[in-house]
Amino acid sequence: MSDKPVRIMNIVGARPNMMKVAPLMAEMKIHREIDPLLVHTGQHYDYSMSQVFFDQLNMPEPNYNLEVGSGTHHSQTAEIIRRFGELVAADRPDMVLVAGDVNSTIACAIVAAKEHIPVVHVEAGLRSFDRSMPEEINRLLTDAISDLLFTTEESGNMNLVKEGIAEEKIHFVGNLMIDSLVGAIDLARQSPLRRELGLTAQGYAVLTLHRPSNVDDPGQLTRTLDAILEVAERLPVLFPCHPRTAARIAQAGIRGLKTWESGPISGNGLWRMAPASYLDFLGLVDQAAFVLTDSGGIQEETTWLGIPCLTYRENTERPVTVTLGTNQLIGSDPERLRKAALAVLDGNADRSGGTRPPLWDGKAASRIVEVLKRYWLDRPLTENHLAQAKL
Ligand code: UD1
């Protein structure tokens, strides 16, 4: 057995990958058996969608940046495959680790699997059972070709077993996103944004919206924002706006939103702002009356923080946030959205605070690293990949 550390290429591409990979990189660095590398595909590239997360999560500069940028799903995925393929040919790692369900995840997993490099998937097994979501396709395919699958909740284990994934590949380790949250929450609570906005605790709501199903159809987007504008007559609703959504709002010619750039907020209304940094966003969510979102990760963060979350989707791939946490799945009908938000404001919704799911304790990274080390040490017994790669 060689003493050489195992070289693991960790992939980030889009914003939600950052808070999953940051605690892993930090943990890997303290184990001499591991030599972690960081690859940024460049799927997200704006300062506010990428670099600010590197800075606030203390992530090292990537060893490689593939700089793919935006495009259609197909061209973006294809371009990542092409560029990552070239990288792997030039600098072959021992393992490739991908996170979540974005296009960068499946693209890099395909390259590694075809090169017979073991693929590690963190946040495996989540299923919305809705194949119209691009992320669901990414999840199914990535899990099918992964060698090690790390899950965040019990549903993930069950889904993988049902799909025929061998149980010895599956490891229930908890939630890396919560590792980052646990590490950042004290700083987030000191973030000056809420004070600058002049908001009192529970005196406002937070909105995020970026799913293609909610923002790409101008009719659905207009009706949704109309419903939220009605809710926003009761309290300020802060809306850190994803670039994709900002573009769709402009294209649809939607009016009535207010724009926040700096200083205290002057009253109720739907306040659009630039995408928030990690610490600013967590600081806002932590004191919100409720959060309205179609994001995946925010359902988990609100559950850990005990903040009511209304998820504006027909399904969730994170059912534990509903069964144990504070998440309520309200569908994607604007009228239901209006009623559910008003019910929270009128005190008619369940506000019990929920409980934190098992193993969401800030220690997922150390559990994952222990499994990775064991896997690598035991590897001579299962040297299949290497043997094939040498053919
Ligand atoms: C991607 C993920 C989604 C995740 C989301 C978080 C996929 C399939 N989707 O969606 O699961 O929840 O990230 O944000 O991978 N843009 C910029 N600046 C950027 C990045 C994007 O302006 O830094 C704009 C571009 O116009 C781009 C659009 O946003 O076309 C969408 O970006 P893209 O990466 O294709 O998907 P997201 O909607 O961000």
Image (cartoon, rainbow, N blue to C red):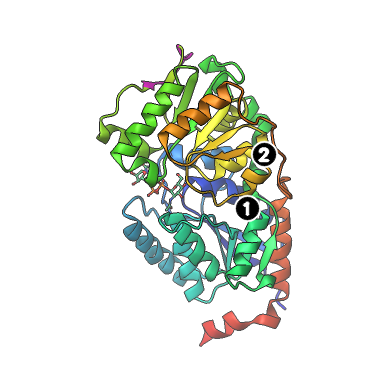
Q: Secondary structure at mark 1?
A: helix
Q: Give the quadrant of residue 32.
A: bottom right
Question: x%, y% of residue 323?
Answer: 66, 45
At x 52%, y 46%, the residue is 16
Residue 275 visible, this orientation: no
- Mark 2 crowdedness (10 Å alpha carbons): few <14, some 14-19, many ≥20: many
Q: Assess mark 2: CB under 8 A from ligand 1?
A: no
**What's the mark number on residue 25?**
1
Q: Secondary structure at mark 2?
A: helix
Q: Residue placed farthest to the top in the image? A: 266
**Residue ID for mark 2:** 304
Residue type highlighted by circle 2:
Trp
Q: Nearer the viewer, residue 390 or 214?
A: 214
At x 61%, y 59%, the residue is 36
At x 47%, y 33%, the residue is 337
Question: x%, y% of residue 317?
Answer: 55, 52
Tell me if 81 is positioned left or right of 250 in this view: right
Answer yes or no: do the residues labelled 2 and 1 have beta carbons within 8 Å? no
Q: Assess mark 1: CB under 8 A from ligand 1?
A: no
* Residue 259 falls inside the magenta stretch: yes
Question: x%, y% of residue 336?
Answer: 46, 34
Residues drawn in magenta: 258-266
* Residue 220 falls inside the magenta stretch: no
Q: Residue placed farthest to the bottom in the image? A: 391
Residue 139 versus residue 215 in the image, above or below = below
Residue type highlighted by circle 1:
Met
**What's the mark number on residue 171?**
none
Which numbered disc flags the more N-terminal residue, 2 or 1?
1
